[in-house]
Image (cartoon, helix red, strand yellow):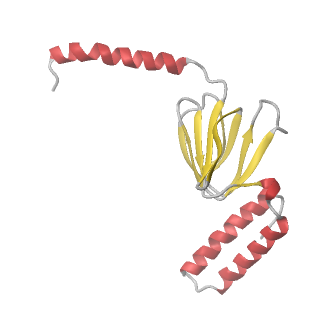
Amino acid sequence: MLSRTALRKFAPRTIQRVAMSTEAAAEPATSVTLNFSVPHESIYKEASVYQVIIPGVEGEYGVSAGHVPYVAQLKPGVLQIVHDEGASGDSEKYFVPGGYALTHPNSVTDVVCPEAVKLDDLDPSAVQSQYDAAKSAFGAATAGSIEQAEAQIDMEVNRAMGLAIGLNLA
């Protein structure tokens, strides 16, 4: 247990540090600093953006300046980066198969994914054929096997990719 002397000696410094960090945190952020990476490259590094709309497993959510700290696992879906307020046409959309997003208290958001593809670069016929191949592999695999599980994941990712570009894969 701390003695009163030690408490009197160290407590004022601790209180002063907490007060200083609270003052620094009180300055309102005006944008989100985005770090968006895949294993082979950084797509965005310390980029100032208006908002990031993230496909979380618990639901889609938007991160804008001053967002509370948050950690989320991503589901297959569309990650949207809005560059300017009110400029919905000035946004970029990426399909991500999963990953993680971490929003820090200082309006910095880190997004890491195993892969990311711009929606404009997706070929609807390739998505359809990949989905059909995964569906066929799922049907041909032994129930409960690793092959069936992998085919199911492929089907789910390709279904989500298809939805992102307007295909209805069933």
Question: Which quarter of the figure has residue 4?
Answer: top left
Residue 25 picture location, percent across and down = 51, 21
Can you say which quadrant of the picture contains the N terminus?
top left
Question: Which quarter of the figure has residue 83?
Answer: top right
Instruction: Tell me what residue is drawn at x 76 percent, y 76 percent.
Output: 132
Above or below, 122 against 146 in this view is: above
Q: How many marks?
A: 0
Q: Foreground residue, 118 or 62? A: 118
Instruction: Tell me what residue is drawn at x 77 percent, y 44 percent.
Output: 92
Can you say which quadrant of the picture contains the C terminus?
bottom right
Instruction: Tell me what residue is drawn at x 57 percent, y 18 percent.
Output: 27
Residue 168 picture location, percent across and down = 82, 65
Instruction: Tell me what residue is drawn at x 64 percent, y 73 percent.
Output: 152
Residue most toward the front?
A: 40
Residue 35 picture location, percent across and down = 61, 41
Above or below, 62 against 100 in this view is: above
11 left or right of 153 in image: left
Question: Which quarter of the figure has residue 167?
Answer: bottom right
Residue 6 picture location, percent across and down = 18, 17
Above or below, 22 against 50 in this view is: above
134 left or right of 111 in image: right
